Image (cartoon, rainbow, N blue to C red):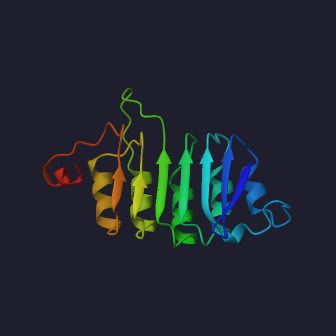
């Protein structure tokens, strides 16, 4: 666990911890006694985070502005919870391993982002399984996007109206 203070805002970076979510949301945590003040949260390599655990954390972080979830299994439900509970969210990095084969297409996460995170300014979906339909949903639902990173999103083809993203 790495906690640091910057500009009087609380930041947290959590690496490889399966109990991190319950720790963050615990009001009795001695090192993290103001979870509601967290503005930036990075969950990297947390493979044992449950849908319920991340959803519980989201409910405790109404001031969250910057979220990174990298290399951990997460589904649409926690993304929906983060969007509902953290209306100030401006930046989301939701990164996976970009596998070209087998070709698996899934727009659920993209639709969850589009429907629940309309205030996003920066979105990184490295290695996501979204398709052109998921990308279109994001572009239609997140009107404030300034940057969009779709590296290794092998199911997206920037043709037609989507060429404006290139």
- Vertical placement of 70 versus 6: above or below? above
Please report the residue visible at 21 percent of the width from the left and 45 percent of the height from the top. Answer: 158
Decide which of 131, 12 is in the foreground and name it: 12
Residue at 51% across, 62% down:
80
Q: Residue at x 33, y 62 (%)?
A: 146
Residue 63 x %, y %: 60, 72
Q: Residue furthest top?
A: 101
Name the residue nearer the viewer: 136 or 66: 66
Camera-side residue of 136 and 152: 152
Residue drawn at (56%, 63%) of the image: 82
Counting labels gives 0
Asked whether, in this view, residue 109 is left or right of residue 77, the answer is left
Extreme-front residue of the structure: 7
Q: Position of residue 114 (x, y in %)?
A: 39, 62
In which quadrant of the rendered view does residue 41 lie?
bottom right
Q: Nearer the viewer, residue 9 or 68?
A: 9
Q: Quadrant of residue 71?
A: top right
Please give left or right for residue 78 compared with residue 48 in the image: left
Image x and y of residue 57, in percent: 67, 61
Q: Does 75 sit left or right of 12 as displayed?
A: left
The spot of residue 159 in percent (x, y) is: 16, 46
């Amino acid at each position: 666990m790495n906690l640091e203070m910057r500009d009087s805002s609380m930041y947290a970076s959590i690496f490889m911890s399966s109990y991190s979510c319950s720790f963050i949301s615990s009001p009795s945590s001695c090192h993290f006694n103001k979870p509601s003040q967290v503005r930036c949260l990075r969950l990297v390599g947390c493979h044992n985070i449950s849908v319920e655990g991340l959803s519980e954390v989201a409910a405790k972080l109404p001031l969250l502005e910057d979220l990174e979830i990298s290399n951990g299994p997460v589904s649409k439900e926690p993304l929906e919870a983060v969007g509902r509970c953290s209306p100030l969210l401006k930046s989301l990095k939701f990164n996976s391993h970009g596998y070209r084969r087998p070709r698996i297409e899934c727009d659920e996460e993209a639709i969850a982002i589009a429907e629940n995170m309309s205030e996003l300014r920066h979105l990184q979906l490295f290695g996501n399984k979204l398709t052109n339909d998921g990308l279109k949903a994001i572009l239609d639902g997140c009107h404030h996007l300034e940057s969009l990173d779709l590296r290794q999103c092998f199911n997206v083809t920037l043709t037609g109206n989507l060429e404006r993203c290139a």
